[in-house]
Amino acid sequence: MTRAVFLAHTAAPSGAELATLRLLDALRATGRYEVTMIYTEDGPMVARTRERGIDTDIVSGQFDSRAMRIGTGILGLLTGFLALLRLGWNVGAAVRDSRADVVVAESTKALVLGSVAARRARVPLVWQVHDRVSPDYFGRLPALAIRCLARLMCRGQLANSRATAATLPTGLPTAIAYPGVELPATQADPRTRPAAEAVVVVVGRLSPWKGQDVFLRAIAALDQRPARVVLVGGTFFGEEPYRAELEKLAAELGVAAEFTGHVDDPSEYLNTADILVHCSVLPEPFGQVVVEGMAAGCAVIAATPGGPAEIIETGVHGLLVPGGDTAALTTALDTLLHDPATRVRLATAGRARARDFDIHTGARVVADFLDTVVTRGD
Ligand code: GLC
């Protein structure tokens, strides 16, 4: 049995952390791995991870994950970086005590922590990458620095899509490990409501790069608005002002959008919506919600470029539109709203396609990759 320690710098329930939780459960189910999750702060993910009976630790220090984010000034970055290194040293002791064979870092900050921790515990470090390490997301210099650090400190990297892999350093063993979904035993049937009764949802954190403003504008431009427009998702990383902006925009546009805030389990929305929209304006690294919507029988419209283009063949499993293109999104919505037959055809093919992203398949890819890293380290 191999022992792997997974590291997360935040315990907020955002995409990467939720993907990690599902992965750990499925990795254990392979019977090949014993897993421990280390968070460096308390938060909702701690209880959710423990609920599943996964060995979970909190190793905290002076580091505040919110104080160091994209857009922080150079001094803030430096102070944050030093605190991260110190925390990494403490994490290293926990890793050593757990007798781990490998450490897996689940974010960029976890990569910094993990670099120190893995050295201290003398085990190989793998970086599981959920973000595109590109100038448009991180800025030019930080993206370069992150790539150099990974190249120097990691034994291998797991990318959540080919789009993400294309932004990573070359010369390291790399595998594509698509995040998996936990497929329900029975998948809901596609919905066939007429346009005026249809339900359209967007699911995900409310964040400017997720483009919910584009969605509201696209809805406003429709001749026939659907019965319900629902934005499911919370704000975690200083994104509260964006929610206020969205509510103001919806009011200005006269769109009666419902904002649910964060919900732990969005399946009640996904299982009943006719259409799920994904509308990120930066290339989405993967886009778990696209697969979740397909698995739940929604007809999905998703933005390109990025992960969604690796999930959906447009016109077959859903519709792809260029991210940030409001007119194209309006056209796609209009097509699906007025043509329930097409909606059902795409949703049915999408539901079958979602099964390719079963978490148990993903966990085997990760286990096989970690095996090669651990063996090479022996
Ligand atoms: C991050 C990415 C998202 C991806 C998720 C899981 O949240 O932004 O695209 O689906 O990680 O890898």
Image (cartoon, grey):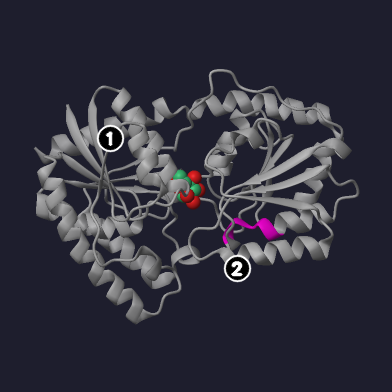
Indicate left or right for 121 with 267 as reference: left
Q: What quarter of the picture does the C terminus occupy? A: top left
Say which residue label 1 marks: 369
Q: Main secondary structure of the magenta part?
A: helix
Q: Where residue 162 sits in the image (x, y, percent)?
A: 45, 44
Part of the protein shown in magenta? 209-213
- Let me know if residue 36 appears in the view: yes
Against 5, residue 85 (above or below) is below
Q: Is residue 211 magenta?
A: yes
Indicate left or right for 182 with 94 as reference: right
Kindly identify which numbered label has been placed on residue 241. Answer: 2
- Let me know if residue 123 appears in the view: no
Is the CB of mark 2 within 8 Å of ligand 1?
A: no
Q: Give the residue at x 18% y 65%.
A: 86
Against 139, residue 237 (above or below) is above
Q: Amino acid at mark 2?
A: Pro
Disc 2 from disc 1: Cα separation: 41 Å
Kindly identify which numbered label has been placed on residue 33. Answer: none
